[in-house]
Image (spheres, grey):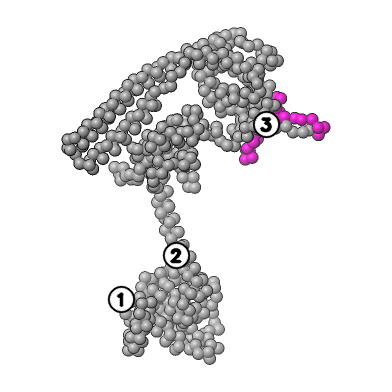
Amino acid sequence: MVDWENTYASRVQASRENRKRYEEEGEVGKMKAVVYTRVSTDEQTKNLSLELQRRECQAYCQRNGFAVDRIFEERGESAKTTARPEFQAMLEYCANNRGKIGAVVVYHTNRFARDARDHLNVTFTLGGSGIRLHSVQERLEDTPAGRFIQTMLAGANQLDNEQRADRCKAGMRAAVEKGRWPFPAPLGFRNARNDRSEATLVHDPKHAPLIEEAFRLYATGLHSKQDVLNKVTRMGLTTAEADKLTLHDFSKMLRRPIYAGWIVVEKWGLRVRGNFEPIVSQELFDRVQLVADDRRPNRPKRHVRDRADLPLRGALRCGSCGHTMTGYFATGRLGGKFGYYGCHNKRCGNRVTVPKGKVEETFQRHLLEWQPTPGVMRMVSHVVTQRWNSRQDIARSSTEHHTTAIREIEGKLTRLENAFIYERAIDRERYDQHRADLEQQLTVARVALSDAQTEDLDLEGALRMASKVLTNAATVYTKMAPGNRRKFLGVLNPCGWEVERSGAIRTPTNAFVYRCLSAENMRSGDKWYARRDLNPQPSVPKTDALSS
Ligand SMILES: [Zn+2]
C-alpha cells in the first residue's frame, strides 16, 4: 500500500536480472511462494499462454515481496484428462514443505480449481498448512471468489481454533473431575492456588460472610428474596464490579451448589465435591432450596387457589412427581359437575388424579388421626421449652462473646485514629489499609452478633396457643372460614401433602410440626400405638369432626 509503485519499478528491473535465481533457489528472508499455471488447448488462443501466466505470476510475487520457490506448469495437452499431475505435485510439495511455503500464486482462480468442491478441498488443505491463495487477476479480498475463498480459509481457521478449544475444554474437564475450579471465581470466592499449586477457591473475606447471612435469612422462610437482598446489600454485598446485585442474579446465587462446595457442570454431566471450603453447610443449602421451591411460581394463581369449593388446591402434591396438584370441575355427560384434584405437571410420568370428595374426606381423617392428643402436646411443649432454653443459653454466651469482640475492634479503630491524627505515627496509606481491615472485621462481628440475638418471644403463650390449635386441628380446619383454610394448612405443613393414586395421603416428613411430633413419639416405630399409650381416648371423637 505504502509505496509499492516505487517498489514495483525497482523490482521489475531486478526481476529481469534475478529471475533465474528466484526460480532456482528462492531468496532468504522473503516469504516463499509456489506458482501454479495451467492451460487447456482452446485457451491457448485466448492469450492465456503458460508463458503469460508465469510472467504475470512472477511479477505479482515481486510486487508482494514473495520469493518464487517453484513453478508448476500444467501442460495443455493433458487438459482433457482429470489427473492434472502438476497440480497434485504442487499440493504434495506444499504438504512436504509445510511451514516454509506461505503462498500459492495463480493467474486466475479458474486456473486453480475446476469447481467449488475442488476449490473448497484445496483451500482447506492449503489453509491448514498456513498457505494463502493469491490470484493475479482477482484481488481476492474484493471479488465474490475471493470472499468465498476467504470464507473457506476462515472456516479452516475456525476448525483449527475449535479443535484447540476442545483440547482446552478437555483440560478444564479433567480439572473439574479432580475437584478444581478452573473458571473465574463466583461472587464470595477468590481464585487461588493451593500448596500443590492447583487451582482452588478461597473465601472473599468481604462477601463470603454476607452470602452466608443471605442463605441463613432466606432459609427461615420468613423473608422474601427481595427483603433478604435489601438487607445484605445494606450490609455491603455487591457484585465483583461493586454494583448492586440484581434480584435475578441474587436468586440464581441462592441456587448455586458451589456455595455448598459442589462443582456442577451440567453440560458435562459432572457433579464433583470441590477442593475448597464451602460458604454454607449442605443442610443450610438444602433448606434454602426447599424454601425457594415452595415459592415457585408454578403454583395456581392466588384467586383460584383460595376458591372455597376446592380448599385443598395447592396443599396437595402429586405422589409420583411431587408437583403441586390443582383442583378443577369437569362437566359430566348428563350435565353434572365432578370435582377433581390432579397433578399439574405435563412431564410427570404417572400423573395422580383423584376425585375431590374422596380426597377431601381422606384428608379430614388424616388431620384427625394426626392431630396430637393433649398428653402428647404437653410432652412436645416440654421438649420445645427445654430446647429453647438451652438455645437461649448458647445465644447469651455467644452474644457476650461477639459484643466483647466488637468493643475490642472499636477500641483498635480509636487507637488507630489517634496514631494517625494526633500522634502522626503512621502514614496515610497504612492508616487506610488498617482501617479498611478493621471495618471489615467489625462488619463480620456485627453480623455474627445479630445472628446470635434471637428474637424476644413469649414462648409459653405461643405454645399454649399452638397446643390448643394443634390438638383440635381437624375441628379447627372444618369450622374455619373456607377462605382461611389454605393459610392454616400452609402453617401446618408448608411443603404440602403427597397423595397416592389410591387417594391415600402420605404423612409429611419435613413439616416442622410433624417433625416435632414424630421425633418425640415415633420411637416405638408406630405412631398410633405410642399415642394411645399416652392418651387412650381421642380428644375429639371422629364423628364430631366429620359431621361439623
Ligand atoms: Zn405428577
Q: Amino acid at mark 2?
A: Asn
Indicate if the residue with disc 2 has its beta carbon within 8 Å of ligand 1. no
Residue 225 relative to residue 357: left or right: left
Q: Which residue is mark 1?
A: 29
C-alpha distance separating marks 2 and 3 = 58 Å
Please report the bounds of the magenta region as a residue range: 333-358
Q: Is residue 354 magenta?
A: yes
Q: Give percent across and percent down for residue 296.
A: 56, 35
Disc nearest the viewer among 2 and 3:
3
Judged from the image, the secondary structure of the residue bearing numbered disc 1 is loop
The first of marks 2 and 3 along the sequence is 2
Q: Amino acid at mark 1?
A: Gly
The image quarter in which residue 387 lies: top left
Q: Which residue is mark 2?
A: 157
Q: Give percent across and percent down for residue 259.
A: 42, 37
Residue at 35% in and 44% down: 191
On-image quarter of the N terminus: bottom left
Q: Which residue is mark 3?
A: 327
C-alpha distance separating marks 3 and 1 = 83 Å
Residue at 59% in and 22% down: 488
Q: Can you see residue 319?
A: no
